[in-house]
Image (cartoon, grey):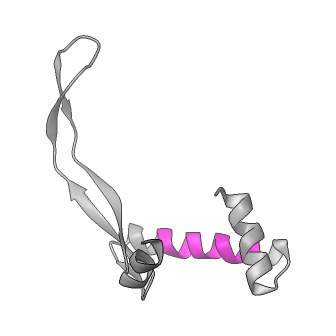
Amino acid sequence: MNKAQLIDAIAADAGLTKADAKKALDAFISATTKSLKKGDRVALVGFGSFAVSKRSQRTGRNPQTGKEITIPAKKVVKFKAGSELADAVQ
Protein backbone atom coordinates (compact mmCIF):
# COMPACT_ATOMS: atom_id res chain seq x y z
CA MET A 1 0.00 0.00 0.00
CA ASN A 2 1.40 3.39 -0.96
CA LYS A 3 0.54 6.80 0.50
CA ALA A 4 -2.29 7.53 -1.97
CA GLN A 5 -3.90 4.15 -1.26
CA LEU A 6 -3.57 4.74 2.49
CA ILE A 7 -5.27 8.14 2.13
CA ASP A 8 -8.10 6.48 0.19
CA ALA A 9 -8.50 3.83 2.90
CA ILE A 10 -8.50 6.40 5.72
CA ALA A 11 -11.07 8.52 3.89
CA ALA A 12 -13.34 5.52 3.33
CA ASP A 13 -13.05 4.12 6.88
CA ALA A 14 -13.42 7.45 8.68
CA GLY A 15 -16.00 9.00 6.37
CA LEU A 16 -13.67 11.88 5.49
CA THR A 17 -12.89 13.54 2.22
CA LYS A 18 -9.61 12.57 0.60
CA ALA A 19 -8.30 16.10 1.27
CA ASP A 20 -9.08 15.82 4.99
CA ALA A 21 -7.60 12.33 5.17
CA LYS A 22 -4.40 13.62 3.49
CA LYS A 23 -4.18 16.49 6.00
CA ALA A 24 -4.64 14.07 8.89
CA LEU A 25 -1.98 11.67 7.59
CA ASP A 26 0.45 14.52 6.90
CA ALA A 27 -0.14 15.89 10.42
CA PHE A 28 0.53 12.44 11.93
CA ILE A 29 3.75 12.06 9.94
CA SER A 30 4.89 15.56 10.88
CA ALA A 31 4.16 15.13 14.60
CA THR A 32 5.84 11.72 14.68
CA THR A 33 8.92 13.06 12.87
CA LYS A 34 9.24 16.02 15.26
CA SER A 35 8.98 13.75 18.31
CA LEU A 36 11.57 11.31 16.97
CA LYS A 37 13.95 14.18 16.10
CA LYS A 38 13.77 15.26 19.75
CA GLY A 39 14.61 11.70 20.80
CA ASP A 40 11.15 10.94 22.15
CA ARG A 41 9.39 7.61 21.70
CA VAL A 42 5.99 7.53 19.97
CA ALA A 43 3.75 4.76 21.34
CA LEU A 44 0.33 3.88 19.93
CA VAL A 45 -1.25 1.37 22.30
CA GLY A 46 -2.25 -1.80 20.47
CA PHE A 47 -0.52 -0.73 17.25
CA GLY A 48 3.15 -0.32 18.13
CA SER A 49 5.88 2.13 18.98
CA PHE A 50 8.49 4.13 17.09
CA ALA A 51 11.84 4.90 18.72
CA VAL A 52 15.24 6.24 17.70
CA SER A 53 18.18 3.90 18.18
CA LYS A 54 21.90 4.52 17.74
CA ARG A 55 23.78 2.24 15.36
CA SER A 56 27.49 2.21 16.15
CA GLN A 57 30.30 2.51 13.64
CA ARG A 58 31.21 -0.77 11.98
CA THR A 59 33.44 -2.25 9.31
CA GLY A 60 31.93 -3.37 6.04
CA ARG A 61 33.18 -4.57 2.71
CA ASN A 62 32.85 -3.05 -0.76
CA PRO A 63 31.25 -5.86 -2.78
CA GLN A 64 32.93 -4.78 -6.03
CA THR A 65 36.50 -4.56 -4.78
CA GLY A 66 36.40 -6.56 -1.55
CA LYS A 67 38.14 -3.64 0.18
CA GLU A 68 37.20 -2.98 3.81
CA ILE A 69 35.35 0.27 4.46
CA THR A 70 34.19 2.01 7.62
CA ILE A 71 30.46 2.53 7.91
CA PRO A 72 29.86 5.56 10.14
CA ALA A 73 27.63 5.58 13.21
CA LYS A 74 24.10 6.91 12.74
CA LYS A 75 20.66 7.10 14.29
CA VAL A 76 17.93 4.84 12.91
CA VAL A 77 14.19 4.66 13.50
CA LYS A 78 12.89 1.35 14.78
CA PHE A 79 9.30 0.15 14.95
CA LYS A 80 8.09 -2.51 17.35
CA ALA A 81 4.62 -3.91 16.69
CA GLY A 82 2.13 -3.99 19.53
CA SER A 83 0.44 -7.20 20.62
CA GLU A 84 -2.90 -6.42 18.94
CA LEU A 85 -1.21 -5.72 15.58
CA ALA A 86 0.97 -8.80 15.87
CA ASP A 87 -2.06 -10.97 16.69
CA ALA A 88 -4.09 -9.49 13.81
CA VAL A 89 -1.36 -10.35 11.32
CA GLN A 90 -1.10 -13.97 12.49
Horizontally, is 20 left or right of 73 in the view?
A: right
Compare residues 65 and 33 and report the one nearer the observer: 65
Residue 67 among magenta residues: no
* Picture layout, residue 33 above or below residue 15: above
Horizontally, is 85 left or right of 18 in the view?
A: left
The residue drawn where x is 49% and y is 73% is 32
Q: Pinpoint residue 52: horizontal percent, then vertical percent.
A: 31, 66
The residue drawn where x is 26% and y is 63% is 53
The image shows a total of numbered marks equal to 0
Q: Pinpoint residue 86: horizontal percent, then vertical percent.
A: 39, 75
Horizontally, is 66 left or right of 89 in the view?
A: left
Magenta-colored span: 21-33
**Res 75 quadrant in image:** bottom left
Quarter of the picture containing the N terminus is bottom right
Compare residues 79 and 13 and report the one nearer the observer: 13
Residue 23 among magenta residues: yes
Q: Can you name the residue that lies furthest to the front here? A: 90
